[in-house]
């Protein structure tokens, strides 16, 4: 039996052929090494992220996450819900808290869920995978599994927005969270604690609707990483990962920069440090290859 | 102008603040703003907002109903939550902005060609079809309905290609794609939620 | 007398003194040059054993004058507390070994310093006598409280609770003052612990007015005698023996004696009649004071507007009306509590006129001081009181109600807002008596050179305004308490509230600064405690703040006095009257022992038993003066014992170096520094003089309020003296030093070292 078990909410973008499918692959590898069993919530649905508000009112949006929580309570009783996507975690946890504090809303949500034969208690803890790592497992155990320390790699810890605000990880400050830096150090790489863009917004969903404004912000995030001599950026959020990685050619074309900065997930780093193959770490999922990680994985 | 909008104007003639309080998600917090302006200074797209959150709160109190609801300011919110964690009065500013945007849309007075408003609606419609987002369709819709069609699509084709190479984009998604099993159950839940919410607002509007 | 004196010296070798210094040499200096009859060393003089050594010398050997060479006079004051002898202290620890680096090349100058401090302490004690009370004192346990508002009543009740008696004098026919007229009170407590942030939570609300209960308590107290319709027509005497004439409206006078006095004369509302641009002539524009009457008249029902009795459905509060403004006829200060008052009054409308009553507060800078402050603001917001940051330009009217034109400072636009009623937030004006220093204070705003020119004009201007006296003091220095700024009676806001420049008379409540009921109650309690202390101290013949317990008091040699009156004018505390022959008459219990009179006296006839022209002058003279070619300059530092001297002690403790050429003498106040010390020092070859006093001016830090100012003025004339000696004026400098200037104070001495290097050694070294 696995050492730890969680009810898992993977989210739309992690599905096969979707934008963060590589994230899921590396998370699965990482969990194997850490002896974590993820029990997927059966028939989970989209959480509407934080951009569903035009079409969805408050209650319909809450109902989406309420359905996922109810399904988890029914099929994975007693298990903490864990999400890997920042938006999924945020929407689910926000729903949970809002319903806990507003009896009227909870009653309405349950009326809606009853239409599909579901019922909600809204009492299971909702965690981001980073919380599982930092709070449930801890740096010591994470470090003890390292087989190939990521020596000589300098990594900018880009925390972004929604894994940081409004809930935060491990009670760290919103202005200067340090858990990614500590994780980077634990894996044997060099962190950049003074990376000033670590909580800068990448534009989120507005990367689609307001590309120029968003790319301006993304440019700053990458530029600062270069200024600190980073070899790559690590992030815990699929939207951050995609926005910061895939628009670099467009930014280069607009601003005359020469960005080619790999952006990886913490789970990618951990899979490589734990001695797993490039495929297990989903390094083939990089649009901008993380060569230094490939080298270590090949050793 | 929708009928509901007319009804709301009638009911809250003297106090837009009361209207926001009753009908907008987390709207009861607006009165607690102390006008320090930290939200305005914390917004990553702050300079793109015609009216910063601080001003929107003041405008609501000053009864500037049309100016607020037809503004495209709220649609500039990236949901970064910086304003929420910094607000000394702990106002859920991000949610209030979403709530105002949604309320304007519901009343039919949100700006028509606002790209984020359109994208946000597309996103909702997309996820509603099968219970999960179909990224490819969302992307294609985005370029043809929000952007400038082929031009935008061409500009982003390299990205699509790169994503496909990295197995993070699947052209087959266009024909079907991921879905939940109990789509009809989900639709019933959402329909009920919408019904309950509309009844609540109609009560205030009547 | 001299024959009765027996001198004994004690040198402590603890704390490293014995390791760093040649104690044998110190002992030799004390005996041979300092003329100590005996001098003993002890390895830890402040220990029980060491203290007993001194005790024995006094009790068994009959020592009358002792010199203790150990740590700073500010350290070990409890161990070295010998009140039955005259005592001086040589500061070898903070003053020498901690202030100098422990290296061989510094050894000689360090020992020089220590030797000098021994010489100085021996010289000082030789000219001291043991202070003793005059014996004229008696304890008077009755306190006079002037003013029957919340402040006065609280002071009376607190005084009575401490077992003292009170005469409470109130000018009007009823107790209660302004507060009795208020509909409700500003809340005094923040939200309860555990009340979460929210939009519908339990936040502080206006409190019921409980002034009636306070009036009943005053009337029910057998220790409080209330005099209604009465004023003080004469006050004479001093702490412990004040005598006051209490005169009724009908003219009958009762004379009572008091130990101390509390002035709680309160405030007046600013006169709004000049604010015509704010619609002050409009019936539906009321002041915040007038609104209380409207609200009270309405009971729990809706408040009605004055013009036609219509129920108010919209009200606008105009904050900061005619205050915090540089405009002519406005108050230059902000009363601080006006926004709390407006929030309270806005809530009257929400409670009495309905939740749909539009209630807008137009503020500039919203200030909500006090425990409930921010929570009370939130409480108002929670009830949908609208707060707008706006600058009001005009209030106009067409028929009933009024229209407020303002600039919305958040939305940056001009707005016109109609309302049934407009409420103006007026400032609080202190109800002080005439300022005895009105002319001086006014002139001091001008550059020094221009003061004489404008004197007559300022005098005429001040004489043209009649202000009714409150205390009618028969002091030479005026009838009432001096003002600090803007007509408020003086007191130091931070360090010593309640203290005024008239010893034994304490100001409390809004006469001191604008405040609300709760603050006035706290203030009155503090003042009551100070008044009781003053009466008790006066009963023992000892000083009040800041030299609490000092039994010495100034005396003067009548035969030398030229009746120049400078001492009577310059005493910051009005302690010195004139007798029938026009000689100064010291009221010892009014005296705070600062020595400003001593510094003022041109003929040097004023002295204290333990502090005089000689006790300092002889220290200056007994420093060993190396010759001009020795490359060992000497810098005299006269440091105020309240701030500068402790700052230098602190500097040494924290490892800062102090110039080896400095010889530091603590003085009670820079105001006590006699010009003769400066000339004597220059004549005996000092190369520079650094004087360190406290900050002066309206935001003074001077513990004696005016001492530092007086010193600065006197020292302006020192340049002439130096010129007659043909010396460079930069050899003498006066600095303002705060107790926190731990790094700066030693640097200032170092700067004088550099000046001496530049201008050369003094040619007066004989």
Image (spheres, coloured by chain):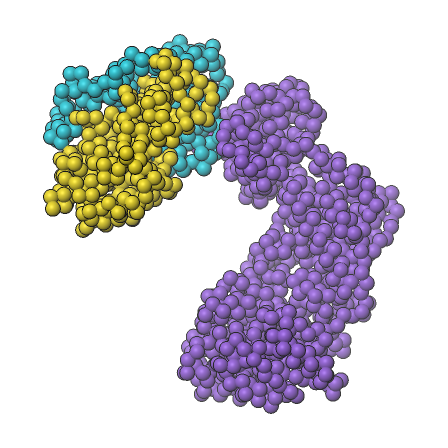
Chain colours: A yellow, B cyan, C purple
Residue at screen point 61% across, 88% down: C31
Horizontal and vertical percent for residue A194? 29, 48
Residue at screen point 67% across, 61% down: C545
Closer to us: A138 or C255: A138
> In the picture, which quadrant includes the N terminus of chain C?
bottom right
Closer to us: C220 or C440: C220
Residue at screen point 47% across, 12% down: B203
Tell me if residue A208 comes above or below residue C323 in the rendering.
above
Tell me if residue A3 comes above or below residue C679 in the rendering.
above
Closer to us: C435 or A143: A143
To which quarter of the image does residue A116 belong? top left
Tell me if residue B201 comes above or below residue C381 in the rendering.
above
Horizontal and vertical percent for residue A255? 17, 38
Tell me if residue B98 comes above or below residue A33 in the rendering.
above
Q: Specify whether residue C46 is in view.
A: yes
- Judge from the rendering whether residue C451 lies leftward or rightward of residue C753; answer left or right: right
Horizontal and vertical percent for residue C489? 66, 51
Q: Residue furthest right?
A: C252
Horizontal and vertical percent for residue C719? 54, 73
């Amino acid at each position: 039996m696995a050492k730890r078990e969680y009810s898992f909410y993977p989210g739309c973008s992690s599905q096969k052929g979707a934008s963060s499918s590589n994230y899921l692959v590396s998370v699965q590898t990482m969990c194997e090494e850490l002896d974590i069993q993820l029990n997927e919530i059966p028939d989970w649905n989209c959480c509407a992220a934080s951009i569903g508000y035009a079409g969805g009112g408050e209650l319909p949006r809450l109902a989406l996450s309420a359905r996922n929580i109810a399904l988890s309570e029914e099929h994975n009783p007693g298990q903490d819900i864990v999400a890997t996507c920042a938006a999924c975690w945020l929407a689910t946890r926000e729903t949970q808290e809002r319903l806990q504090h507003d009896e009227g809303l909870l009653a309405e949500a349950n009326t809606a869920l009853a239409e599909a034969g579901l019922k909600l208690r809204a009492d299971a803890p909702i965690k981001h995978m980073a919380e599982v790592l930092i709070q449930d497992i801890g740096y010591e155990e994470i470090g003890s599994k390292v087989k190939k320390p990521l020596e000589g790699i300098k990594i900018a810890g880009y925390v972004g927005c929604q894994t940081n605000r409004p809930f935060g990880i491990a009670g760290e400050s919103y202005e200067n969270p340090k858990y990614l830096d500590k994780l980077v150090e634990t894996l044997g790489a060099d962190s950049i604690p003074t990376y000033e863009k670590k909580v800068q917004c990448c534009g989120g969903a507005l990367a689609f609707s307001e590309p120029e404004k968003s790319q301006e912000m993304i440019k700053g995030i990458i530029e600062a990483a270069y200024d600190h001599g980073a070899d790559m950026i690590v992030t815990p959020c699929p939207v951050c990962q995609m926005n910061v990685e895939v628009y670099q050619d467009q930014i280069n074309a607009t601003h005359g920069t020469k960005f080619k900065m790999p952006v990886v997930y913490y789970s990618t780093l951990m899979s490589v440090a734990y001695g797993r193959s490039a495929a297990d770490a989903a390094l083939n999922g990089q649009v901008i290859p993380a060569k230094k990680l490939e080298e270590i994985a090949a050793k | 102008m929708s009928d509901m909008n007319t009804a709301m104007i009638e009911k809250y003639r003297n106090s837009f603040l009361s209207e926001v309080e009753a009908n907008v998600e987390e709207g009861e917090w607006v009165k607690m703003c102390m006008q320090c302006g930290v939200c305005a200074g914390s917004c990553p797209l702050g300079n793109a907002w015609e009216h910063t959150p601080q001003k929107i709160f003041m405008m609501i109190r000053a009864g500037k109903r049309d100016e607020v609801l037809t503004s495209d300011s709220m649609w500039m919110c990236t949901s970064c939550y910086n304003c929420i964690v910094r607000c000394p009065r702990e106002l859920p500013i991000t949610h209030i902005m979403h709530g105002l945007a949604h309320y304007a849309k519901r009343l039919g007075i949100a700006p028509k060609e606002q790209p984020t408003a359109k994208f946000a609606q597309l996103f909702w419609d997309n996820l509603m079809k099968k219970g999960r987002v179909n990224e490819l369709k969302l992307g294609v819709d985005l370029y043809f309905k929000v952007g400038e069609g082929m031009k935008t699509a061409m500009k982003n084709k390299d990205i699509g290609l790169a994503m496909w190479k990295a197995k993070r984009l699947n052209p087959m998604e266009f024909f079907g794609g991921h879905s939940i099993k109990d789509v009809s159950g989900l639709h019933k839940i959402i329909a009920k939620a919408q019904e309950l919410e509309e009844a609540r607002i109609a009560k205030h509007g009547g | 007398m001299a024959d009765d004196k027996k001198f004994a010296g004690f040198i402590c070798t603890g704390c490293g003194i014995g390791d760093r210094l040649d104690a044998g040499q110190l002992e030799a200096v004390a005996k041979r040059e300092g003329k100590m009859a005996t001098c003993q060393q002890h390895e830890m003089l402040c220990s029980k054993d060491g203290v007993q050594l001194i005790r024995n010398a006094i009790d068994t050997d009959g020592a009358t004058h002792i010199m203790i060479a150990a740590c700073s006079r500010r350290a070990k004051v409890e161990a070295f507390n010998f009140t039955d002898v005259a005592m001086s202290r040589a500061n070898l620890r903070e003053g020498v070994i901690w202030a100098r680096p422990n290296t061989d090349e510094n050894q000689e100058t360090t020992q020089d310093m220590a030797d000098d401090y021994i010489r100085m302490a021996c010289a000082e004690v030789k000219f001291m006598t043991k202070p003793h009370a005059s014996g004229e004192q008696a304890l008077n346990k009755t306190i006079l409280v002037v003013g029957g508002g919340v402040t006065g009543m609280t002071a009376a009740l607190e005084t009575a609770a401490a077992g003292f008696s009170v005469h409470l004098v109130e000018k009007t026919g009823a107790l209660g003052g302004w507060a009795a007229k208020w509909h409700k009170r500003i809340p005094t407590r923040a939200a309860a612990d555990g009340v979460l942030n929210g939009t519908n939570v339990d936040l502080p609300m206006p409190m019921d007015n409980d002034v009636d209960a306070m009036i009943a308590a005053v009337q029910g107290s057998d220790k409080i005698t209330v005099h209604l319709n009465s004023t003080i027509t004469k006050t004479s005497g001093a702490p412990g023996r004040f005598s006051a004439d209490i005169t009724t409206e009908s003219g009958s006078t009762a004379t009572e004696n008091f130990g101390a006095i509390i002035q709680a004369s309160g405030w007046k509302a600013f006169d709004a009649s000049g604010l015509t641009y704010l619609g002050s002539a409009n019936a539906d524009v009321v002041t915040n004071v007038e609104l209380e009457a409207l609200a009270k008249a309405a009971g729990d029902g809706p408040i009605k507007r004055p013009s036609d009795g219509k129920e108010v459905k919209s009200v606008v509060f105009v904050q900061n009306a005619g205050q915090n403004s540089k405009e002519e006829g406005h108050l230059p200060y902000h009363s601080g509590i006006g926004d709390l008052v407006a929030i309270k009054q806005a809530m009257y409308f929400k409670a009495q006129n309905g939740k749909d009553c539009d209630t807008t507060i137009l503020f500039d800078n919203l200030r909500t001081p006090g425990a409930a402050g921010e929570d009370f603001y939130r409480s108002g917001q929670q009830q949908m009181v609208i707060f707008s940051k706006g600058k009001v330009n005009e209030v106009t009217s067409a028929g009933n109600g009024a229209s407020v034109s303002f600039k919305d400072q958040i939305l940056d636009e001009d707005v016109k807002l109609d309302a049934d009623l407009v409420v103006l937030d007026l400032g609080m004006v202190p109800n002080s008596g005439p300022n005895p220093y009105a002319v001086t204070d006014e002139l001091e705003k001008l550059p020094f050179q221009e003061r004489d020119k404008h004197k007559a004009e300022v005098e005429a201007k001040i004489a043209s305004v009649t202000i009714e006296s409150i205390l009618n003091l028969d002091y030479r220095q005026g009838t009432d308490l001096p003002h600090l700024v803007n007509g408020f009676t003086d007191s130091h806001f931070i360090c010593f509230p309640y203290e005024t420049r008239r010893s034994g008379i304490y100001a409390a409540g809004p006469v001191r600064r604008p405040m609300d009921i709760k603050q006035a109650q706290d203030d009155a309690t503090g003042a009551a405690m100070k008044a009781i202390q003053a009466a008790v101290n006066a009963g023992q013949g000892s000083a009040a703040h800041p030299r609490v317990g000092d039994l010495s008091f100034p005396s003067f040699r009548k035969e030398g006095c030229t009746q120049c009156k400078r001492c009577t004018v310059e005493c910051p505390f009005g302690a010195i009257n004139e007798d029938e022959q026009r000689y100064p008459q010291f009221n010892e219990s009014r005296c705070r022992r600062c020595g400003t009179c001593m510094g003022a006296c041109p003929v040097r006839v004023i002295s204290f038993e333990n502090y005089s022209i000689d006790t300092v002058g002889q220290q200056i003279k007994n420093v060993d003066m190396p010759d001009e070619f020795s490359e060992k300059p000497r810098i005299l530092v006269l440091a105020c014992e309240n701030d500068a001297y402790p700052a230098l002690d602190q500097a040494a403790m924290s490892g800062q170096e102090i110039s080896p050429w400095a010889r530091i003498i603590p003085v009670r106040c820079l105001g006590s520094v006699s010009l003769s010390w400066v000339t004597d020092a220059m004549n005996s070859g000092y190369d520079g003089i650094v004087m360190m006093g406290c900050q002066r001016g309206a935001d003074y830090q001077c513990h004696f309020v005016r001492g530092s100012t007086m010193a600065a003025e006197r020292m302006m004339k020192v340049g002439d003296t130096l010129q007659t000696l043909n010396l460079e004026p930069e050899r003498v400098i006066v600095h303002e030093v705060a107790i926190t200037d731990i790094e700066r104070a030693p640097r200032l001495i170092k700067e004088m070292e550099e000046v001496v290097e530049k201008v050369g050694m003094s040619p007066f070294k004989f």
